[in-house]
Amino acid sequence: MLASSAVDTDLMYFPTQDTTGAVTKNLMFELNLPVSYDARSNLDGCLVMASVSNGQVNLNLNFANNIDGTDVAANLFTSGTAIINNIYVTVYQQGIIPQNNAIPLISAQTVYELLGGFSYSTMAPGVQMFVDYPQARNILANHMWYVNGGAVTTNGTDIASINLVMNSNSIILQQTPQMIRADMRTRFKSDLPAGYYYQDHRHQSIQTQTYGAIQKALVFNTVNANSHLDVCWESTYSLGIAGAIGAVQQ
């Protein structure tokens, strides 16, 4: 058996930051935004456009004003002054045309959600930190990206453990970063950038009723200055319920 430090879980490395210089450079990328659980088997969360007269769905893209800095996750360039001259966006959508509006009612009344934008910076070496799961949701997956002082660490050696706990003390899933990365490789047939952790709950979704009842408990080995943990959840909930009871807290 190989020691955990000898197991390569980072075949895909994060792109190296560049200096701006005095040249024009083009940046191209693609974003895929799902709006239902699975278009082939489960339409929960789908947008039923035909049921709303003159209904509109807007996609808002906010571009950063400053893309220079030392954080590998937030900045494209390490130095210089980057100026965005032109932005070109091509948008396309995939959909189905059901016969006789045969969309299951439960699918139309279910919200499929990618809940992100949560960033934590209160971690300390050797101290367990809790990340609360949002309430009133069926949690399908959890995404986390740990950026340690502006850099990402291969093989997850900067984190000791990532556990799923209930009521702050009962461990229901105990894993190391290497175990999670190995599971990710099996699911994606590839490796995501270092420091990124994806835990899939789709085979048995986690139903949260009370805020803080289900938590992610992390123990960090090293925490450098300006470190941050970015968190996102994939979930579904009944239309009009989660927002009414203040389900999202940080």
Image (cartoon, rainbow, N blue to C red):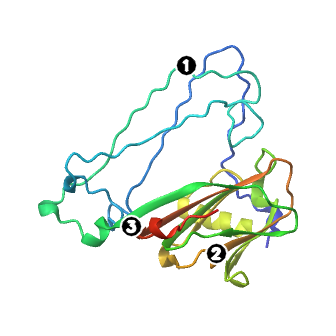
Looking at numbered disc 2 in the image, what kind of residue is underneath it? Gly
In the picture shown, does residue 23 fall above or below 218?
Answer: above
Residue underneath mark 2: 212
Q: Residues within 10 Å of mark 1 (few under 14, many from 20)?
A: few
Q: Residue at x 55, y 19 (%)?
A: 85
Viewer-side label of 1, 3: 3
**Could you say which disc has been placed on residue 85 in the image?**
1
In the picture shown, does residue 92 fall above or below 11?
Answer: above
Viewer-side label of 2, 3: 3
Viewer-side label of 1, 2: 2
**Could you say which disc has been placed on residue 190 in the image?**
none
Query: Can residue 147 be seen in the rendering of this structure?
Result: no
Looking at numbered disc 3 in the image, what kind of residue is underneath it? Gly
x, y percent for residue 160: 81, 68
Label 1 element class: loop
**Could you say which disc has been placed on residue 240 in the image?**
3
Quadrant in the picture for residue 179:
bottom right
